[in-house]
Amino acid sequence: MTQQHRAEVEHAAELIDQADALVIAAGAGMGVDSGLPDFRGNEGFWKAYPALASAQLDFTEVASPGTFRSDPHLAWGFYGHRLALYRNTLPHPGFEILRRWAGRLEHGAFIFTSNVDGQFQKAGCDIDDVHECHGSIHFLQCLKPCSDDIWPAGGLEPRVDVESCRWLGDLPTCLNCGGLLRPNILMFGDGGWLEQRAVDQRARLDAWLSKTQRSVVVELGAGTHIPSVRNFSAEVVHNHGGRLIRINPREASVPSSMGVGLPVGALAGLVAIDELLGGQLRPTDD
């Protein structure tokens, strides 16, 4: 570790030690250390899905309601594979580090994530303390949609031909109208996403933020290409007086007045900070 890197990690540890609340802002890079694929650009997407590379289909084309209408077996092949992948993936140790930090702060933690994988809940985080701004693959809705209903995807067992990335057998159908189901996820060019679940989550997040005074945002693996998470981090800093720890191997720069940037992966950054904190934060006053 270079002297400059050591100083940045020390600064990050100080910010956490002084905080009364932990805001976890996670993008796609948070899952890379768990072995999840990185869809940043077609290179990563096509590496994970060679059949779609052969067809020259990019992520924005496949991840759209239009594909569910034009080729539902392909669309469900892609999302069915992802659903099975996320169910079978174990969250990396960084999730537990964040939970431990949160347990030592007065107001605990709230999570804002653009990830649809449900990994924070799988790691043991309270479902009421997570805002999934793009929805969740673990919930389903009607493609039309015919109503505002959404359903848990727990009973859906994906059967996918991995080589062709196509769904095998009968497609999932709406319990109300019998039409095609889709994941309750905000896709590209999506005018039919049922957002009420995410709206309710955001309301809980805003109520929680209003109680905090010295929050620190730990932003993990959130890039500028789809800036949902970065925009939220800036909002907390500017509107709630928070400070920012940005952990990102490619885009880590942070204005010095906002906090500190660590140019490493999510797990490496969390472990480095945790080592300085000795695995324990200072006791709270209660």
Image (spheres, rainbow, N blue to C red):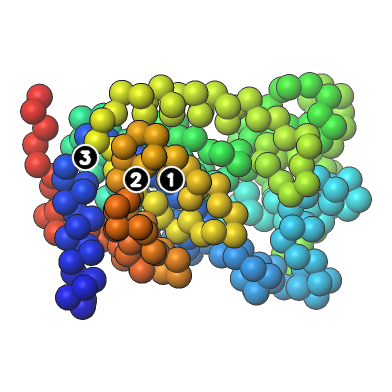
- Kindly report the distance in space between the C-alpha atoms of the residues bearing marks 3 and 1: 17 Å
| CA neighbours of label 1 inside 10 A, class few (<14), some (14 to 19), many (20+) | some
Q: At x 74% / y 53%, what residue is drawn?
A: 63
- Residue ID for mark 1: 234
Residue 39, x across and y down, in percent: 61, 63
Residue 43, x across and y down, in percent: 65, 74
| CA neighbours of label 2 inside 10 A, class few (<14), some (14 to 19), many (20+) | many
77 vs 192: above or below: below
Amino acid at circle 3 = Ala
Mark 2 or mark 1, which has the lower sequence index? 2
Amino acid at circle 2 = Val
> Which numbered marker is on residue 217?
2
> Which numbered marker is on residue 19?
3
Q: At x 30% / y 46%, what residue is drawn?
A: 243
Mark 2 or mark 3, which has the lower sequence index? 3
Residue 207, x across and y down, in percent: 41, 22
- Kindly report the distance in space between the C-alpha atoms of the residues bearing marks 2 and 1: 9 Å
